[in-house]
Amino acid sequence: MFGGSLGASIGITSKLAAEQRPALEQLLFFNVNQYRVRVGIQQSIDTYGVPEIYERDGALRVRVGDIAGVQTLFAISEVGKPLGVAVFVRSAHERFAVLHLGVDPKLDPEPLIFKSVGEGSQQLNYAKVYSGLYEFEGHVVP
């Protein structure tokens, strides 16, 4: 599962087992990739508040400042370890704002080439795909 492979099953849940607190703290507070998005993290904290992990009914959740209705989705491995976390709040039924994101830094897929609208060398681009299927000229990559 690690070292670039996303071939194993990944589940999505709104609750995380309490024993996963150290792994969640690592994703949210001690992630080695935070320096890449430091400005955005600071803006989110200034606007919404500091994320806080808390336990309710035997499960971990995340709250942010005094904002009501903060929700969390966890991407978890087959054994329940958090691989990613998204903390968000809905401003309306059809709109939401992502407050904080964390992704396990060991999950680093290889960039895939894709063709886009453009001319010459501008047609070829690369992207890292973390979820879903990628298809190009009959080749499907999970």
Image: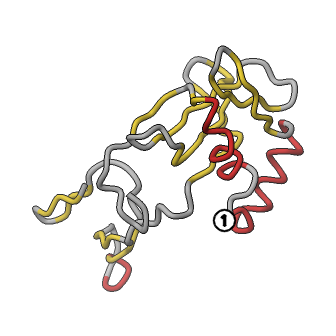
Crowd around label 1: few <14 · some 14–19 · many ≥20 (10 Å): few
Residue 138 occupies which quadrant of the picture?
A: bottom left
Q: Is residue 69 above or below residue 12?
A: above
SS category of the residue bearing label 1:
loop
Query: Horizontal placement of 137 versus 32: left or right?
Result: left
Residue 24 occupies which quadrant of the picture?
A: top right
Query: Horizontal placement of 79 versus 15: left or right?
Result: left
Q: Is residue 101 above or below residue 66?
A: below
On the rendered image, what quadrant is the C terminus found in?
Answer: bottom left
At which x and y percent is residue 44?
80, 45
At which x and y percent is residue 94?
55, 22
On the rendered image, what quadrant is the N terminus found in?
Answer: bottom left
Query: Horizontal placement of 82 versus 116: left or right?
Result: right
At which x and y percent is residue 90?
65, 24
Residue situated in front as seen by the camera: 34 or 42: 34
At which x and y percent is residue 97?
66, 35
Q: Which residue is mark 1?
A: 33
Q: Is residue 47 above or below residue 105?
A: above
Report the residue at 57% width, 29% height from top. 17
Q: Residue furthest left?
A: 138
Q: Amino acid at mark 1?
A: Asn
Report the residue at 62% width, 23% height from top. 59
